[in-house]
């Protein structure tokens, strides 16, 4: 029996959300603002849905785990739930900020917290931080793991499920790119999901493929006057967005590379100066 409702949530503000330079931070934590966003979400999340949640699943990056623990603290405490970590839900790029930590580091960071790492412990998931193979930052690999994640949810018996993941991956997971573009129709550099934004979905299986369809109430709340895109329009917008994201990541990596070279040159110059080699020149 598939869940009757799946609520998707984007993580709260992380330090990497503050500046592009912070994308060089490995697996960043939530900012104080992000922690406050979680508290607000816990207070404002529809009680009818909060009370019915039976399963909470999160990407294994630190910001998503903390978002799940803080935002759904009331039902976690009430029902003695644990946050189940699913590696397929990790973010799309291989930038440091989107690369997870080792299982040992996760256990250390969340010692005593109600998390379930059983899926992370499976041998086939040992290389989940490698960003290679099925974890690679390319569209075909990301689409495949989004499919695997949807099928995993479909296999669950819990009726109300909350999924905490990332803005970029959510477009692949829900197969909805309709709010990724600017008013002029060109794709934005980021995501259509705000920090701690949530949307409700039902599970359907047209032609045997597991899909998520946003509920009419959820869609009307955020896009009251926007006509849904056709399947072809979604694909065109997806391709344009992927191209822009790829170029943005290429530029960031080049920026890090140049700055790394410059930092090494400065360090060498500093070593020479401290060694006295600069005197008398």
Image (spheres, rainbow, N blue to C red):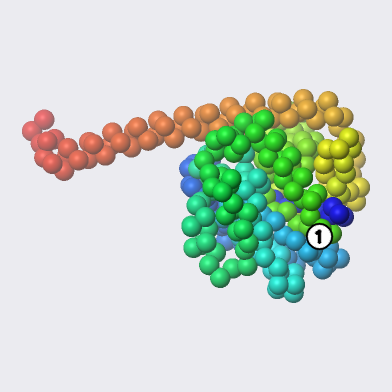
16 up-or-down from 75: above or below: above
Question: Badge 1: few (under 14), some or many (20 or more) residues near its Cα, within 10 Å?
Answer: some
- Tell me the quadrant of the picture where the N terminus can be found: bottom right
Where residue 12 appears, as percent x and y from the top left, is 65, 55
Circle count: 1
User: For the point 87% across and 29% down, which residue is it?
Assistant: 230
Where residue 281 appears, as percent x and y from the top left, is 11, 30
Q: Where, by quadrant of the figure, is residue 82 drawn? A: bottom right
> Left or right: 98 with respect to 70?
left
User: For the point 48% across and 47% down, which residue is it?
Assistant: 25
Where residue 68 appears, as percent x and y from the top left, is 67, 60
Please name whichever residue, 105 or 24, is drawn nearer the observer in this view of the structure.
Answer: 105
Where residue 226 appears, as percent x and y from the top left, is 88, 38
User: For the point 78% across and 27% down, which residue is it?
Assistant: 235
User: For the point 59% across and 45% down, which residue is it?
Assistant: 124
> Left or right: 63 with respect to 227?
left
Q: Is residue 193 visible?
A: no
**Disc 1 element:** loop
The residue under label 1 is 158
Please name whichever residue, 256 or 69, is drawn nearer the observer in this view of the structure.
Answer: 69
> Left or right: 61 with respect to 147?
left
Residue furthest toward the bottom? 78
């Amino acid at each position: 029996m598939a869940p009757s409702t799946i609520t998707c949530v984007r993580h709260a503000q992380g330090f990497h959300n503050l500046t592009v330079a912070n994308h060089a931070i490995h697996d960043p934590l939530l900012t104080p603002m992000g922690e406050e966003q979680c508290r607000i979400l816990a207070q404002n999340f529809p009680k009818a849905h909060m009370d019915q949640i039976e399963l909470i699943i999160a990407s294994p990056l630190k910001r998503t785990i903390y978002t799940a623990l803080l935002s759904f603290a009331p039902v976690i405490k009430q029902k003695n739930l644990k946050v189940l970590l699913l590696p397929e839900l990790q973010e799309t790029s291989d930038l440091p900020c989107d690369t997870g930590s080792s299982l040992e580091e996760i256990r250390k960071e969340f010692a005593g917290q109600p998390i379930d790492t059983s899926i992370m412990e499976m041998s086939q998931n040992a290389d989940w931080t490698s960003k290679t193979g099925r974890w690679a930052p390319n569209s075909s690999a990301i689409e495949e793991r989004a499919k695997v994640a949807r099928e995993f949810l479909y296999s669950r018996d819990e009726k109300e499920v909350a999924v905490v993941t990332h803005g970029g991956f959510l477009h692949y997971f829900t197969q909805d790119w309709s709010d990724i573009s600017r008013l002029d129709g060109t794709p934005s550099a980021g995501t259509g999901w705000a920090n701690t934004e949530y949307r409700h979905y039902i599970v359907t299986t047209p032609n045997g493929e597991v899909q998520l369809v946003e509920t009419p109430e959820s869609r009307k709340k955020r896009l009251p006057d926007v006509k849904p895109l056709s399947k072809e329009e979604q694909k065109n917008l997806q391709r344009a967005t992927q191209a822009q994201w790829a170029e943005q990541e290429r530029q960031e990596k080049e920026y890090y590379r140049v700055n790394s070279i410059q930092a090494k040159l400065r360090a060498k110059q500093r070593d020479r100066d401290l060694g006295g080699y600069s005197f008398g020149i």
